[in-house]
Image (cartoon, grey):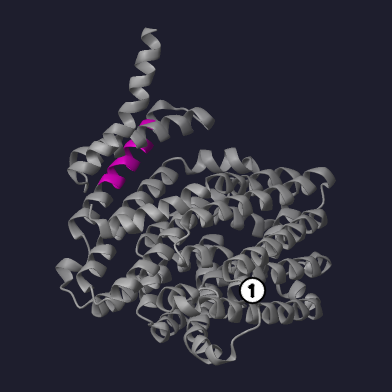
């Protein structure tokens, strides 16, 4: 492994490790809530945070994420760029909060749930506070303070989970959960202001001279992000519009996000953008290509490992986590899980490094048009599965288009653009491991937790064994993997002898 690729993966793992506690906490939130709320109230909770998640990305207007471009490129004026972002995010948050409150009845009607209007104000306040604090880990990562960003992610995720779950457990009502997350957002904003004042040691007035340059880069990217968010969430809104809150809860569970996937993808993409931008400024194109190839190989390997394991234990996992009331979510979950593989190709991050924001707008517009044009047909044809089918299909088409554009920007031969042999080996290993696990589970006749454990162990052993024997690993990586496996086994043997 070269030093350039180590500089991508290892800082990303630092960011990931700091989110381990937060990952566990975030993972447990819906699992706890589904046992507190009935399906209708859980569906209302999911709809409220669907609104929040949609507007959280849209209202950033590209200002926060653009810091990954400006801070490595112009470190001397980093504080000015951060102040500009904070100012615009604050204004955007206030405008959004007012709009949500005044349109609360219309939103409730659109999502086919009259109870939404009772909670709109609290989710609007939460959104405003979170928008103003979103720059915290971004600034830390862009300034290569990866350990600090890791700690910030961990503490933030953990506090959010505590202040989300405890009020719901104590009072048993959705309103108190929302009060808890508002308190969390206030604490996070206070921590963000404290850190930025310490880091830059001056006021938070925006720099009018840099604002034009900042907006010129950020707004096209922000527009691309808006279109992407609309496209990515449209299937959720379509299901909410056509079905009641309880059915929406079943679909939302099927689209259950594994936080670790998002954390790893986001952390790696953030570090990749910072390092790749530095190498591009230095004209080191060969290093940029090496970063891209090695990062893609490692991410696809990890994501295929996770996706295959989830497919092997899908039914048992959903029932264990969300109870048998959500068995109908299993087919949706299996199809949704396949889309995670695409996350291994960090094309959006690379396009942003090359300032290809207009292309991102075009690409995301194509995705949105495809979803709008086909989702009703898919819903009528395949019911709930139709919404996730169209999402998977559009994601595949868009990723192919993005890969073609990235290849053109890197100006390399197709044979060198991706680690084709490694990707083929990873796919083959995953397929064999999944089918072996499913076959053993079927033959054993087990169900519930024993079936989950058996299929998971078989899948892990087959995948790991084939990876070491046939897989796309260097000799050093194979030795490291064997070391990780042998260490606990050796300890167990020593303890057994004693």
Quarter occupied by residue 7: bottom left
Q: Which region is colored magenta? A: 429-440
Relative side of 226 to 471, left or right? right
* Residue 230, percent from left and from top: 56, 76
* Residue 69, percent from left and from top: 43, 76
* Residue 147, percent from left and from top: 49, 53
- 490, 359: nearer the viewer: 490
Relative side of 119 to 334, left or right? right
Q: Is residue 215 above or below residue 326?
A: below
Residue 439 part of the magenta-drawn span: yes
Q: Is residue 334 visible?
A: no
Residue 356 part of the magenta-drawn span: no
Residue in the image at 63% along x and 54% along y: 156
Residue in the image at 72% along x and 57% along y: 184
Q: Secondary structure at mark 1?
A: helix
Q: Is residue 349 above or below residue 430?
A: below
- 470, 125: nearer the viewer: 125
Q: Is residue 136 above or below residue 326?
A: below
- Sort mark 1 into few (<14), some (14-19) or many (20+) by Cα contacts within 10 Å: many
**Magenta stretch, overall SS:** helix
- 208, 30: nearer the viewer: 208
Quarter occupied by residue 398: bottom left
The residue that label 1 is drawn on is: 55
- 113, 63: nearer the viewer: 63
Residue in the image at 70% along x and 69% along y: 127
Q: In what quadrant of the picture does the C terminus appear?
A: top left
* Residue 179, percent from left and from top: 80, 58
The residue at the far front in this view is: 201
Relative side of 429 to 318, left or right? left
């Amino acid at each position: 492994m070269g030093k350039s690729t180590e500089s991508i993966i290892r800082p990303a793992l630092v960011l990931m490790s700091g989110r381990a506690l937060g990952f566990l906490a975030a993972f447990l939130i819906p699992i706890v809530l589904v046992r507190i709320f009935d399906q209708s109230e859980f569906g209302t909770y999911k709809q409220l945070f669907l609104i929040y998640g949609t507007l959280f990305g849209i209202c950033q207007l590209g200002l926060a994420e653009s810091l990954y471009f400006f801070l490595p490129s112009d470190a001397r004026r980093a504080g000015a760029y951060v102040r500009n972002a904070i100012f615009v995010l604050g204004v955007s948050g206030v405008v959004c909060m007012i709009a949500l409150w005044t349109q609360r009845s219309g939103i409730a009607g659109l999502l086919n749930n009259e109870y939404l209007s009772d909670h709109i104000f609290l989710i609007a306040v939460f959104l405003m506070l979170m928008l103003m604090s979103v720059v915290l880990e971004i600034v830390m990562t862009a300034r290569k303070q990866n350990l600090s960003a890791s700690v910030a992610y961990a503490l933030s995720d953990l506090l959010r989970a505590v202040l989300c779950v405890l009020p719901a457990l104590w009072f048993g009502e959705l309103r108190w959960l929302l009060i808890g997350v508002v308190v969390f957002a206030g604490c996070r904003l206070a921590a963000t202001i404290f850190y930025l004042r310490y880091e830059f040691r001056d006021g938070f007035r925006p720099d009018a001279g840099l604002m034009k340059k900042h907006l010129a880069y950020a707004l096209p990217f922000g527009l691309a992000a808006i279109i992407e968010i609309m496209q990515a969430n449209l299937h959720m809104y379509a299901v909410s519009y056509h079905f009641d809150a309880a059915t929406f809860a079943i679909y939302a569970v099927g689209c259950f996000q594994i936080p670790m996937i998002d954390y790893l993808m986001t952390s790696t993409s953030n570090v990749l953008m910072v390092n790749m931008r530095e190498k591009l400024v230095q004209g080191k194109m060969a290093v940029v290509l090496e970063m891209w190839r090695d990062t893609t190989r490692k991410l696809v390997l990890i994501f295929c490992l996770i996706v295959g394991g989830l497919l092997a234990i899908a039914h048992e996992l959903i029932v264990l986590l969300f109870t048998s009331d959500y068995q109908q979510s299993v087919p949706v979950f299996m199809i949704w899980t396949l889309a995670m593989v695409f996350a291994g190709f960090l094309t959006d991050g690379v396009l942003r490094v090359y300032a290809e924001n207009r292309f991102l707008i075009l690409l995301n517009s194509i995705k949105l048009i495809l979803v709008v044009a086909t989702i009703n047909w898919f819903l009528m044809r395949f019911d709930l599965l139709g919404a996730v089918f169209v999402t998977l299909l559009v994601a595949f088409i868009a990723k192919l288009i993005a890969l073609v554009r990235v290849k053109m920007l890197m100006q390399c031969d197709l044979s060198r653009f991706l680690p084709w042999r490694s990707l083929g080996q990873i796919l083959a290993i995953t397929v064999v491991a999944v089918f072996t696990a499913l076959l053993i589970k079927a033959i054993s006749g087990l169900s519930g937790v024993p079936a989950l454990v058996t299929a998971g162990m078989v899948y892990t052993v087959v995948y790991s064994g084939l990876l070491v024997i046939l897989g796309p690993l260097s000799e050093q990586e194979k030795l490291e993997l064997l070391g990780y496996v042998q260490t606990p086994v050796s300890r167990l043997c020593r303890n057994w002898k004693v």
